[in-house]
Structure formats: structure tokens, C-alpha cells
Amino acid sequence: MLVLLPPSEGKTAPADGPALELESLSFPRLNRVRDQVSRALVRLAGTRRAGEVLGLGSTQADAIETDARLFEVPCAPAGRVYTGVLFGELDLASLDAEATRRAAQQLAVASALFGLVRVTDPIPAYRLSGTVTLPRLGPVASRWRPVLPAVLDEEVCDGLLVDLRSGTYVNLGKPSTALAPRTATVRVLHEVDGRRTVVSHFNKATKGRLVRDLLVEGAQPTTVDELATAWRDLGWTVEQSGTALDVVTT
């Protein structure tokens, strides 16, 4: 099983650690595109247009500086750098040794800069959204689409992919036709007085808890049906339609 997480815009910049080395990252087949995108980002961050292109305001000059010095600033494991709502609920630091080992093997994070990373991969606190178009390189999504599906096929093999990415990061590369029947997608619905809505905060927080429960329990589902059953056994309300799972919270 591979659980594919969205990245978080919120990141904690490491105070110390090694400099970025693309060769140290998992999924080495992505390194050619990683090199192209990262170098284009460094070039952009050194220009006056950086804030406009990256969607960063005048108070986020430190983020642009980090991008400009991408290969010089300290790195830390991705699971510590990403600090959004989902990662807060996932709370990797509090897992026991066995659950931590499972997280290292089973989790990957989608990234506009790196394509995919393991939670143990050392990365800097970069800023680059999946919607950005980089000068001379074009939309970052168009760079990842030709390569990500094959990497997912290779990694998942005949197992299960749990795709928790948001639409922006699904656009970096959808599962192949062969993998699609073994890919579970998850929507979180928040129910109040019989009315169901998708609320961003509850969506992210619930996905973090869902993944944490699988890691703590040591569940090893190999099909979408088994995944739905595993979450139900853990107390979640799950409605299934083919490979699409709705998790209903109140």
C-alpha cells in the first residue's frame, strides 16, 4: 500500500541540517525533472517578479529568499518540514517505532518541486504551488504529468494506492489506467443536521487522522474494499461507490 498525501503550504524551516541533494531523495526516476524545476525556481527567486509568479506577498520575502538559496539552506525530513493541518493530525513525531517504520515505507507526499517525496526525505522549506508557471519552463504540472504515473505504477505494483491529494496535486499526474482500479480516492463530508458539506479544515484534519489510524493499527489493506472495511473497523463511517470512499464526520 502506498498512501499519497498532499503537501502543506505551511512549512517549518529547519534550523540546521544537510543541504539539498536531489540524489538523496526517494523515487530517483524523478531527478531529471526535479533538477529542471528546482533550478528554474532558483532563477525566478532571484528576480523582481518572484513574488508575483509564486503568489507570495511582500511579507513573505523570507520564503523567496529560501527559494533563491534552495541548494544552500538546511533540510530536514519532509514529515517534519510540512506542518499543515493534515500533518498536525497525523503527528508523525508521536508514533511508536513500528508505526514510524510503516510511515517511512507507506507514505509519500506530492510536491510541485520534487514530484513525490517520502516523509523521511530531507527537503528545505521551499515555496512552490502546483498551479505555478515558471518562466522558460512552463506550468510545473505539465513537467510532472509525463513521469509521475509510471513512477506510481512502479512503486505500487499490484498493491493499493490511497490517493488523498487535492485537485491541484492530482493534476501533477493521475494514476495510470492500469492502476486506477486499485486506487482509492477519499472525500470527507461534514454532516450537520442532516446536511453534508465539504469543509477544507475538516477534510485535511480527518485525512490526517485516517492515515494515523492505519499506521497505529498496522492495517495492510490490499484492495479498496479492504481499506473501507479497515476504516469501518476503526470506528469511521465510510460509504463506498466503486473506488471512491466518502468518510462522513459529524
Image (cartoon, helix red, strand yellow):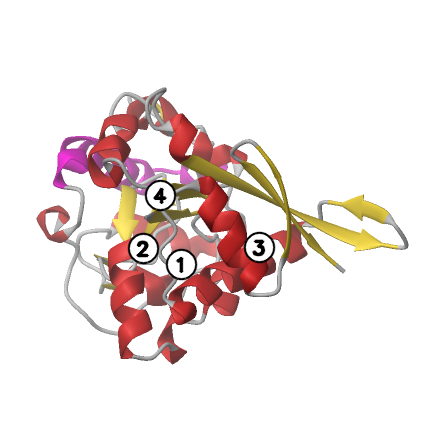
Q: Position of residue 78 (x, y in %)?
A: 31, 60
Which residue carries the number 2 mark? 66
Residue 248 in view, yes or no: yes
Start and end of the magenta stretch?
A: 28-54
- Name the residue type under label 1: Asp
Distance, label 1 to label 2, CA atoms, is 6 Å
In-front residue for pair 154/240? 240
Which residue carries the number 3 mark? 204
Q: Which structural element holds mark 4?
A: strand
Distance, label 2 to label 4, CA atoms, is 16 Å
Which residue carries the number 4 mark? 111
User: Is tag 3's residue or tag 2's residue first in the polypeptide sequence?
Assistant: 2
User: Is tag 3's residue or tag 4's residue first in the polypeptide sequence?
Assistant: 4
In-front residue for pair 31/86? 86
Cβ atoms under marks 1 and 3 closer than 8 Å: no
Q: Is residue 30 magenta?
A: yes
User: Is tag 4's residue or tag 1's residue first in the polypeptide sequence?
Assistant: 1
The disc placed on residue 62 is 1
Q: How many marks?
A: 4
Q: Quadrant of residue 132?
A: top left
Residue 130 in view, yes or no: no
- Name the residue type under label 3: Lys
Which of labels 1 and 3 is toward the front? 3
Q: Which structural element holds mark 1?
A: helix
Q: Position of residue 186 (x, y in %)?
A: 55, 43
Cβ atoms under marks 1 and 2 closer than 8 Å: yes
- Name the residue type under label 4: Ser
